[in-house]
Amino acid sequence: MEDILIKIINYLIPVVLGYCISVISSYRKKNNATNKALKIMLQNNLTNTYFVYSSKKKITDYVYRNWLNMLEEYENLEGDDFIHNLADRMKSWEIVRTDILNNQENVI
């Protein structure tokens, strides 16, 4: 009886491990695809925001803060240096300080 249980256990362990590995592999592929899609969306949004404000060389503080937050997440996803070139150019822009609740703007 013990021999039969040992044989069953020895048979089931590789089957269960194989199944677990295939599930983990599937999740990893989905996660990689999700990260790639997110990185592309962030890059698109960062680039669009840059070109919307580039003609005036002026950006509101809350948009700039959001842009920097998106840049940080883009970097965490190992985004390329193209966006860093845009970030370097934006450093010389005027940042318009806003008080959104009172609809007031002040150039810093």
Image: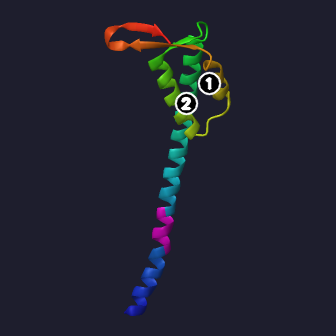
Across and down, in percent, residue 49 comes to 54, 17
| Magenta-span inclusion, residue 15 | yes
Looking at the image, which is closer to me, 87 or 28? Answer: 87
**Residue assigned mark 1:** 87
Relative side of 85 to 20, left or right:
right
Answer whether residue 90 is magenta in the image. no
Above or below, comparing residue 107 to residue 16 in the picture = above
Q: Amino acid at mark 2?
A: Leu
What residue is rendered at 44% in x and 19% in y? Answer: 62
Q: Position of residue 5 (x, y in %)?
A: 39, 86
Three-letter code for the amino acid on which mark 1 is drawn: Ala
Majority SS type along the magenta span: helix
Q: Which residues are drawn in magenta?
A: 14-20
For residue 71, the mark is 2
Quarter location, residue 92: top right
Q: Are marks 1 and 2 in contact (CB under 8 Å)?
A: yes
- For the residue carrying disc 2, how many other residues have a C-alpha within 10 Å: few (<14), some (14-19), or many (20+)? many
Give the spatial CA distance, label 1 vs label 2: 8 Å
In the image as oriented, which residue stretches furthest toward the left? 101
